[in-house]
Image (cartoon, helix red, strand yellow):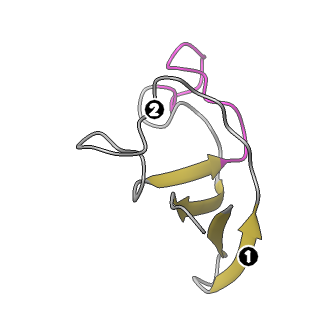
Amino acid sequence: MITYYLVTEFVSLLPGVANINVTDSQIPLTGPNSIIGRAVVVHADPDDLGKGGHELRKSTGNAGGRVACGIIGLQG
C-alpha cells in the first residue's frame, strides 16, 4: 500500500491511498540501497527517454504534469 498526497494547482495536499503490486528481484527492501523511504512520482504521460522531438525531452522526458507522488514504505 502506498499513501500518497495529490498536489493541486493551489498547493493543497489531498491525502489518499493507492494499492499496487510490484514484483522485482533487483530492488532491495533492506540495506543501504533499500527502496524503503524513497520517493515515487507518477506523471501524466510516458517518459520519452530523451528521444522525442519536444524541447522538454532532455530535462523532463516530456512526461507531462505530476499527478501523484509519495514515499515508499511498508505497512504491517
Assign the magenta stretch its main secondary structure.
loop
State the residue at coordinates (45%, 32%).
Answer: 27
Q: Is 49 colored magenta in this rendering?
A: yes
Locate residue 40, reporting x and y percent: 52, 51
- SS for dot 2: loop
| C-alpha span from label 2 to label 1 | 25 Å
User: Would residue 46 be found to the left or right of residue 48 on screen?
Assistant: right
What x and y, as percent, mark residue 42? 64, 49
x%, y% of residue 44?
72, 46
Q: Position of residue 50 (x, y in %)?
A: 49, 19
Image position of 53 with respect to 38: above or below: above
For disc 2, the marked residue is 27
In which quadrant will I find the N terminus? bottom right
Task: Give 50 or 76, whichever is nearer the viewer.
Answer: 76
Q: Which residue is mark 1?
A: 16
Q: Secondary structure at mark 1?
A: strand
Whether residue 65 is in magenta: the answer is no
- Residue farthest toward the left in the current orientation of the protein: 32
Whichever of labels 2 and 1 marks the residue nearer the N terminus, that label is 1
Q: Quadrant of residue 2?
A: bottom right
Q: Is residue 56 above or below residue 7?
A: above
Question: What amino acid is at disc 1?
Answer: Gly
Location of the C terminus by quadrant is bottom right
Q: Is residue 8 above or below residue 71?
A: below
Magenta residues span: 43-57
Q: Residue 52: which disc?
A: none
